[in-house]
Amino acid sequence: MAISLKKTMVALGLTTVLAASAQAADYTLKLHHFLPKQAPAHKNLAVSWKEAVEEQSNGRIEVKLYAGMQLGGKAPNLVDQVKDGFVDVVWTLPGYTPGRFPAISVFELPFMVSDAESTSQALQAYYEANASVQEEFKDVHPLFFFTHDRGAIHTKEKVVKTLADLDGLKIRIPSRPVADAMVAYGATPVSMAVPQMPEALSKNVIDGTVVPWEVVPAFRLHELANSTTEILSPNGRGLYTSVFAFLMNKKKYESMPDDLKKVIDDNSGMSWAKAMGKVWVDAEKPGRAMAEKRGNSLQSLPEADVAKMQISAKPVLEAWAKEMDEKGMDGSALLESAQTLLDKYTAE
């Protein structure tokens, strides 16, 4: 009996030591984002980053994940949540706060996307190469930027077979540059974050939405929108993309010792931008397959209409450059930088 009790106490003591070791993280980071846990991005971005940081820090950094705005607020609040230290890391879209990050939005202009992997690398390089873009994020510690693949037009009732079919349709858009483009194409843009989109479609608040195929499974968009129109130029450019930002609280990063900063640094920058771009390329396939299986209408806009769209988009690009000039930046130089980098990484 005494030996058994002694063994029990030793086992309990060992359990206590192990439990204490498991809780021995020097830093705990709260990571907050706007998509539900079932979205591929949660596993492929949030979970992947958490696992990499925890493993490479030997458990000295713990990352707690909060998906689907679990900690409160709406998607546009994420930037302020990380800036103010309410959370430590966020994944968000700068475009959800129009006018706040104008220089980074150049990749949201019409036909400024090839595939997500190439465009994400061009975007990251653009941020690293331009001080005026970096200045926009001075209140936070940017980890990396990336984009989704070429966005498509998903509509509930009307099938968009030609450019003229967009006329008068209420289309959900993610950012101001995309809104400007939709106006140029004759549609009525309706700005809202992705989580609001399903209800807006079901209640006929909007006639359709622009999103990549990647979004379809998480929100069962193929059941809400019966038709999808893809837009692709002869040089492989798509209609639009959205800029994603993975941001960290500046004070939390600066409070870390150099060896843990290195862990964060090693999970930042171009390598993660490229990897996440590849994730978004691969994430297109399941959504498309679901729409095909349901028998939804799938079509590509005729090449002649795509050419018209590109011509109509030119004033949108020129207006963006002029706006940057008015904000004290060289808009033409920024636009040229983005286009040159996009050509470079697409060619590679």
Image (cartoon, helix red, strand yellow):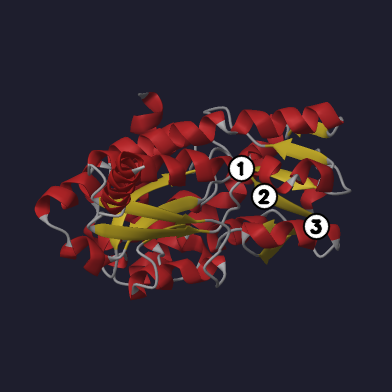
Q: Which secondary structure, mark 1?
A: loop
Quadrant of residue 162 within the rendered picture: top right
Q: Give amino acid for label 1.
A: Gly
Q: Give amino acid for label 2.
A: Val
- Which is more N-terminal, label 3 or label 1? 1
Mark 3 vs mark 2: in front: 3
Whether residue 322 is visible to the viewer of this picture, yes or no, is yes
What residue does disc 3 label?
A: 201
Q: CA distance from mark 2 to mark 1?
A: 6 Å
Q: Which secondary structure, mark 2?
A: strand
Q: CA distance from mark 1 to mark 3?
A: 17 Å
Compared to residue 240, the image places residue 178 above or below, namely below
What residue does disc 2 label?
A: 210
Residue at x 44%, y 36% (from the top left corner): 277
Mark 1 vs mark 3: in front: 3
Q: CA distance from mark 3 to mark 2?
A: 12 Å
Whether residue 53 is visible to the viewer of this picture, yes or no, is no
What residue does disc 1 label?
A: 151
Residue at x 26%, y 46% (from the top left corner): 59
Q: Give amino acid for label 3.
A: Leu
Q: Residues within 10 Å of mark 2 (few under 14, many from 20)?
A: many
Q: Quadrant of the N terminus?
A: top left
